[in-house]
Amino acid sequence: MLESLSAQEINTMPRTGISVQTPSKMEVIGLNVKYGSKQALFDINIGFRPNKVTAMIGPSGCGKSTLIRCLNRMHELVPGARVEGKVLLDGQDIYGEDLDPADVRRRVGMVFQKPNPFPNMSVADNVVAGLKLSGTKDKGHLEGIARKYLERVYLWDEVKEDTKRSGASLSGGQQQRLCIARALAIEPEVILMDEPCSALDPTATARIEQLITSLKENYTVIIVTHNMQQAARIADYTAFMYLGKLVEYDETTTLFENPHEQLTERYITGKFG
Amino acid sequence: MNTRRVVVDKVLLSLTVVALVAAVVPLVSIIIDVTARGIGAIDLDFFTQLPPLANTQGGGMANAIQGTVLLVAFSSAIGLPIGLFSGVYVSEYGRTSRYGSLVRFLGDVLAGIPSIVTGVLVYTLIVLTYQSFSIIAGSIALGTMMIPIVSNTTGEALKAVPNSIREASLALGVRKWRTSLLVIANAKRSIATASLLAIARITGETAPLILTAGISTLWFTGFNQPVASLTYYIYYFATSPFTNWQNLAWGAALFLMIIVLGINMGVRVLTRGKRVYA
């Protein structure tokens, strides 16, 4: 149905709920993304509120992962990828010419779909990997940081007996919490999560969700999920994407209980996807 | 129908066994023959004395061992770093650019060049220019041969490191060059393996040395002077009509074989039970 509409038409559709006065931590303006000749995102405009959890949902291939990867310039690592438009972080365009992507990524951390601890590093070294690889050498300081963030992700009690063992020896859920600790240790302002629970069992998922909820006190959290229940449980705001377009963006309760768009309603009631 | 399957199965199995035997028999007979004929020539003199005159007693291959060690060391000093860095370029920087595939292509071409051709090239450029065979010329020829071997295997080893490691590092705001070092650290075992195999390969080279390092009956006398090597001495002594030289050639062949086998065993130990990206 939506395929026949232009990006312009979709983006000018009326949306309700979100006050334009709320300042955004990150703001995406007129974002178009192409892989070679194939366009993945069409004129996306969206703002992410500070100290809130924003979820992006939609069927596979809708562009939600592409969008989240544009927010810390990871997307440009894909060969042939081109980005047009602006992504503002506290009002500053992260695609500005004088900006080093590494500096952007230090302010906008990322957790990936599959837990990816560094296999040749210990649990403790994994947490402080970002600091060590960027030149911090003070051992005592690093040990303190490692403990602080392992405690922050509720992993300390499980690994304190032996923080020297390999990060790869942990269970999947522990590995993912380790990766979150690693992302937090560089003290970012925004945390991006690309389907962080899709490789985990329900118990491990529950622990991560609990952690995400606690994170918004200090961070702005943006999460991509294919699991609508998860978005409903943890997100303050939810964006629904379809075929590279942003269809609807609203407070989570509104989007799930009283969606404005027929397409959103059909998706969340399971009529397609 | 069923019997036909059984017959086909048996025939194919027999063929593989025959092929296996055909492959193993020459290998084993070479090892046995070289050991049996060479063992008598290996004594203390073999490692400490200079080569003897024809039809005399005693003498050894000490200068050839010294020369081979020096040649391998100097050619590694040339070939390993250049090969390593170009492998890193192919995998980490040039994967999408035209230069990356060009380097990769040149690596394949260079790896396929017969060693005698490399020898002729270095002979023309270095030996004729300085009017002398030299250890420098030999090392340049062998080092040139190492570059594509090390570059190609290093590139493959790095490409086999999961992309998630690069992404994890870059997403932490780690700079590109530092991320590449991390990727190299994750493939260090494969890279060490590739380097050892390249060293084993050039240790056994003869043809380019005939045209570049030359041969010498003396110890190492200078970088711009010819130098003895085990492989050239094997060729030189084995084709001579003198029994004492022929015996030393067998001894040198055995010693060389043990070294190369030793390196390959070292590779096995290095990679045993470990995940190797190669």
Image: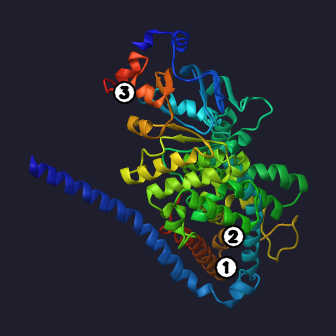
Quarter of the figure with the C terminus of chain A: top left
Residue at point 44%, 30% (across, down): A253
Task: Look at the picture and state if B189 lies above or below B262.
Answer: above
**Is A93 placed left or right of A64 in the picture?**
right
Residue with the mark numbered 2:
B236
The answer for how far apart the CA atoms under marks 3 and 1 are is 88 Å
Amino acid marked by disc 1? Trp
Residue B278 visible, this angle: no
Please, is residue A46 above or below residue A180 in the view?
Answer: above
Location of residue A192 by image quarter: top right
**In front: label 3 or label 1:** 3
Callout 3: helix, strand or loop?
helix
Residue A137 visible within the image: yes
Any mark on residue A268, and which?
A: 3
Residue carrying label 1: B245
Marked residue chain, label 2? B
Characterize the local packing of mark 1: few (<14), some (14-19) or many (20 or more) Cα atoms within 10 angstroms: many
How packed is label 3: few (under 14 Cα within 10 Å), some, or many (20 or more)?
some
From the top left corner, tell me how far across and down residue A185 is, in percent: 65, 54
Position of residue B81 measured from the top left corner of the image (x, y, whole percent):
74, 56
The location of residue B125, given as percent across then percent down, is 83, 49
CB atoms of marks 2 and 1 within 8 Å: yes
Please, what secondary structure does the residue beneath circle 1 have?
helix
Residue B49 is situated, as x and y percent measured from the top left of the image, at 75, 86
Q: Amino acid at mark 3?
A: Ile
Quarter where residue A82 is shown: top right
Q: Are marks 2 and 3 in contact (CB under 8 Å)?
A: no
User: Would you place residue B61 above or below residue B177 in this image?
Assistant: below
Q: Nearer the viewer, mark 2 or mark 3?
A: 3
Instruction: Quote the CA–CA distance across marks 2 and 3.
Output: 83 Å
Q: Chain of mark 3?
A: A
Disc 2 secondary structure class: helix
